[in-house]
Image (cartoon, grey):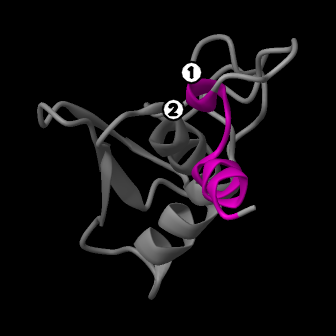
């Protein structure tokens, strides 16, 4: 596993950071972590009621990219196994399920 990763990288997620720390992800209670776009999206996808905010020096659209990516990621996407429950699917997958 990489030696140093951003604060939003989950300990069980072995993927490396992609880019600098540019956003802050907050959960429904307001607790949060700063992160690169990659890990921030993975964290946001795993939270109920999470929010993402750009840090002051973030590139344009960083928070939008994280929000958009999180929509298509499954919660805790680094875990293997069958995903059949709504809580295990991405927001996009759940929307598609209800529109058919």
Q: Is residue 97 magenta?
A: yes
Q: Quadrant of residue 71?
A: bottom right
Q: Which mark is residue 10?
A: 1
Sequence order check, earlier mark of 2 and 1: 1
What segment is highlighted magenta in the picture? 86-99
Query: Residue 56 location, x and y as percent?
Result: 24, 72
As rendered, which of 13 and 70 lies closer to the eye?
70
**Camera-side mark, 2 or 1:** 2
Q: Quadrant of the C terminus?
A: bottom right
* Magenta segment, prevailing SS (helix, strand or loop): helix
Q: Which mark is residue 46?
A: 2
Q: Which mark is residue 95?
A: none
Looking at the image, residue 43 lies above or below residue 4? below
Looking at the image, residue 62 lies above or below residue 4? below
Give SS at disc 1. loop
Left or right, residue 77 beside residue 22: right
Q: Residue at x 65, y 44 (%)?
A: 90
Residue 18 seen from this side = no
Looking at the image, residue 81 lies above or below residue 22? above
As rendered, which of 98 and 30 lies closer to the eye?
98
Left or right, residue 100 beside residue 56: right
Instruction: Tell me whether circle 2 and circle 1 mark residues in contact (CB < 8 Å).
Output: yes
Give SS at disc 2. helix
Q: Residue at x 29, y 65 (%)?
A: 55
User: What is the distance, in whole Å, between disc 2 and disc 1 at their CAs?
Assistant: 10 Å
Query: Residue 77 location, x and y as percent?
Result: 73, 30
Left or right, residue 42 beside residue 32: right
Residue 78 seen from this side = yes
Q: Quadrant of the N terminus?
A: top right
Q: Residues within 10 Å of mark 1 (few under 14, many from 20)?
A: some
């Amino acid at each position: 596993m990489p030696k140093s990763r951003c604060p939003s990288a989950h300990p069980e997620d072995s993927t490396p950071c992609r880019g600098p720390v540019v956003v802050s992800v907050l959960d429904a209670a307001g607790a949060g972590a700063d992160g690169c776009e990659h890990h921030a999206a993975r964290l946001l996808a795993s939270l109920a009621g999470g929010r993402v905010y750009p840090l002051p020096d973030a590139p344009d659209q960083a928070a939008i990219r994280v929000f958009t990516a999180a929509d298509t990621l499954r919660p805790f996407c680094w875990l293997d196994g069958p995903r059949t429950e709504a809580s295990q699917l991405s927001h996009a997958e759940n929307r598609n399920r209800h529109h058919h």
